[in-house]
Amino acid sequence: MSDRLQRGSAIALAVASLAILIASCLVGPANLTIGESFGALFDDSAAGTILREIRLPRALAAWLAGAALGASGAVMQGLLRNPLADPGVLGVSAMAALGAVIAIYFNLSTHAEWATPAASILFALAATAVLQAFGAGRLSPARLILVGVGLSSFAGALIALVMNLAPNPFILSDLVNWLFGAVANRSFDDIALTAPFMGAGFLFALFAAPALTALSLGEETAATLGVDMARTRAVAIAGAALMTGASVALAGAIGFVGIIAPHLARPFVAHDPGRSIAPAAMIGGAILAAADLVIRLLPFDQELKLGVAAALIGAPAFIFVAARTQRIAR
Amino acid sequence: MTSLSLDNIGVRRDGAVLLDRVNLRASAGEFIGILGPNGAGKSTLLRAIAGVERLCAGAILLDGADLEQLRPTARARSIAYLPQARDIHWAMTAEAVASLGRFAYGAPHRLGPEDRAAVERALALTDALPFRNRIVTTLSGGEQARIHLARALAAETPILLADEPTAALDLRHALSIGSVLRAKAAGGSLVLAAIHDLGLAQRFCTRIIVLHEGRVAADGAPGEALSESLLAGVFGVGVTDLPHQQFSAHIP
């Protein structure tokens, strides 16, 4: 693809992603025509309240969570040079989920509405600190994955323990619902709490991006090309962890977007792992915004959870990627 | 004038001694062939100079400064390294891979005109222009080897380390790469290459170092270093067994 074509497709991607975000705001159970919805964004009617207080934050939350997972997945795949790495591979998402689960268990949100996402972010940061303390910057991909698997299992066991100890079925149901992943009833406060961490993580990711491109030739060659490997790993891991943790805090545990989005982004950037981060964010955001749109249109009494919908679509896509990618075992 | 000096360097891995008290002085203009049987330490020596192998003893000095003190970018601007393992993990184009040679001068997809010109020269030297836009993973082994060499040449560093640069190449390209490396040395660079083909080494190198069990067994001009007794002692072959015997004699 020529440079010009690539730039054009990158712009098209961003426009399409934003279009899906806007479409997601315009559709919902309240029967507003698209024209009404658009006008209502800016007036004081009931429709305006619906749009600004319910649909916009919900659509934005889905888009942001997807974008953060997509970018984070692109960073992890570039760093580990493995097309099947995902944001969960470091164990940060499991730890973030554990934080939320503990907050729900102790009913902290009755004291402060932001307690659940805040606990989630805190645990994600703690997990990142643990990874860095274990010298994540010095670890080879295989060992990093092993540490991540350990961290995930540990967090998973503690989540099971909390659920085991749940004092009543209501809390248990809250826990399960949260773990499924959803963006229903998200407010701008939730977004304001999590978005800065996503933004910071994204900046870290962009900072590590050129080194990720050099890493295509392996770590040793990258080092001889002038890449500071220890710093690159530390920055990339911090960036991926911040975005993943913030995404889990905002929308719960949502799988597969982080694997699929970078994969779909790669053809747009000639398979350059360093340049796939921003397109992966656009695609991840579009996938979750679209998935949430579909959920709201489905005629079920019980609304389908976003995480469930993402897995229903994502798991077959995952199998497709795994079967088609030739160079996985690395 | 580039000068490289290895002072009594040693490398161990898991208790095994890979390099033992190796001394070497080399300067710009030399094309040094590093020879030796499998396991002699050829790759380890190049890896040590490239900075990807930790020394357990001694020091490597580049123009009098300890290499370990150099920042990664500064080191990359002085030394280019073509490793033996040549992985490419993503389906990038050949040109994109070669462009990574300019990494120490700017982000991979924001190369300046000078960088582009250097990449262009390197692709031409390695005869890689015809497949510059192909996806590297679809290229043959020899074509991939040339792209990797183009990547190392594109850095246009005063020192080039090449581990088996001709291993996967057909005869025509092996000979042409041999002269490319020789010309690079003649142009004022220092080239060190681990080479298996004694004939090629004798034909192109200005100096030959023979390693044996991690130590320097011989060091000298191509005609002198590969004596009959050395070949018997180090490689375990008599001269009559050498496939290139007829063409190794007295060719500069």
Image (spheres, grey):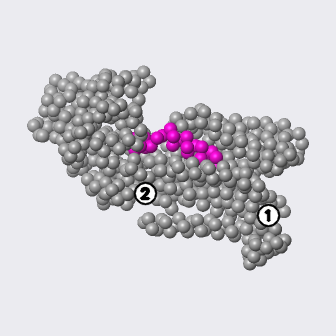
Q: Residue B216: where, in percent of width, then height?
A: 25, 25
B121 vs A237: above or below: below
Q: Residue at x 62, y 41 (%)?
A: A90
Rendered image quadrant of residue B234: top left
Is residue B189 within the magenta segment? no
Position of residue B44 in the picture relative to residue A85 (left or right): left
B205 vs B96: above or below: above
Q: Residue at x 39, y 36 (%)?
A: B70
Is residue A236 within the magenta segment? yes
The residue tagged 1 is A53
Q: Residue A276: where, in percent of width, then height?
A: 53, 56
Position of residue B227 in the picture relative to residue A287 (left or right): left
- Identify the subunit bearing mark 1: A
- Identify the subunit bearing mark 2: B
Mark 2 belongs to which amino acid?
Arg
Q: Secondary structure at mark 2?
A: loop
Q: Nearer the viewer, residue B12 or A52?
A: A52
Same chain check for tags 1 and 2: no
Mark 1 belongs to which amino acid?
Glu
Say which mark, if any, is on residue B110: 2
* Residue range corresponding to the magenta coloring: A221-243
Q: Nearer the viewer, residue B186 or B35?
A: B186
* Prevalent SS, magenta region: helix
Q: Residue at x 66, y 67 (%)?
A: A20
